[in-house]
Image (cartoon, grey):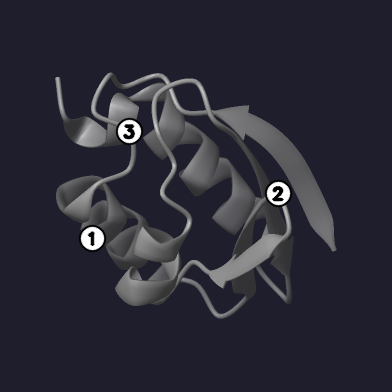
């Protein structure tokens, strides 16, 4: 398993469109990907799970990936965060 703490830097946080981008990105990988915020652990391949995090601007999300392509999956999610979920 690989993991990394990432910060939500887009002003609107992770709302429906960013959540859809997360699901689309994570679903391209065989590995399981989870977002952890506080005591909530969300499957990053489920838009409803991602929405339950209520991740607002400035939130810190622990991203965990486990499986055969875990490193690539984590890198793709990290890029998505860096690009502000393609919202700019």
Compute the Cα span from label 1 to label 2.
21 Å
Measured from the top left, where is residue 6 in percent x and y? 61, 31
In this view, the mark in front (1 or 2): 2
Residue at image coords 44%, 72% = 49
In this view, the mark in front (2 or 3): 2
Q: Which residue is mark 2?
A: 38
Q: Which residue is mark 3?
A: 13
The mark nearer the N terminus, 1 or 2, is 1
Mark 3 crowd level (few <14, some 14–19, many ≥20, 10 Å Cα): some
Tag 3's secondary structure? loop
Compute the Cα span from label 1 to label 3.
13 Å
* 60 shown above or below 58: below
Compute the Cα span from label 2 to label 3.
16 Å
Measured from the top left, where is residue 81 in percent x and y? 43, 32
In this view, the mark in front (1 or 3): 3
Residue at image coords 27%, 19% = 11
Quadrant of the rendering where the C terminus is positioned: top left
Query: Would you say 37 lies left or right of 39 here?
Result: left
Mark 2 crowd level (few <14, some 14–19, many ≥20, 10 Å Cα): few
Per the rendering, the mark at residue 69 is: none
Residue at image coords 62%, 75% = 31
The mark nearer the N terminus, 1 or 3, is 3
Measured from the top left, where is residue 10 in percent x and y? 31, 22
The mark nearer the N terminus, 2 or 3, is 3
Tag 1's secondary structure? helix
Q: Which residue is mark 1?
A: 20
Tag 2's secondary structure? loop
Query: Would you say 68 lies left or right of 81 here?
Result: right
Quadrant of the rendering where the N terminus is positioned: bottom right
Q: Nearer the viewer, residue 57 or 17?
A: 57
């Amino acid at each position: 398993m690989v993991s990394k703490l990432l910060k939500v830097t887009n002003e609107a946080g992770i709302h429906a469109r960013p959540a859809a981008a997360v699901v689309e990105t994570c679903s391209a990988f065989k590995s399981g990907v989870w977002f952890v915020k506080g005591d909530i652990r969300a499957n990053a391949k489920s838009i409803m799970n991602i929405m339950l995090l209520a991740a607002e601007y400035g939130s810190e999300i622990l991203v965990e990936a486990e499986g055969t392509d875990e490193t690539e999956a984590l890198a793709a999610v990290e890029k998505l965060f860096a690009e502000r979920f393609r919202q700019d």
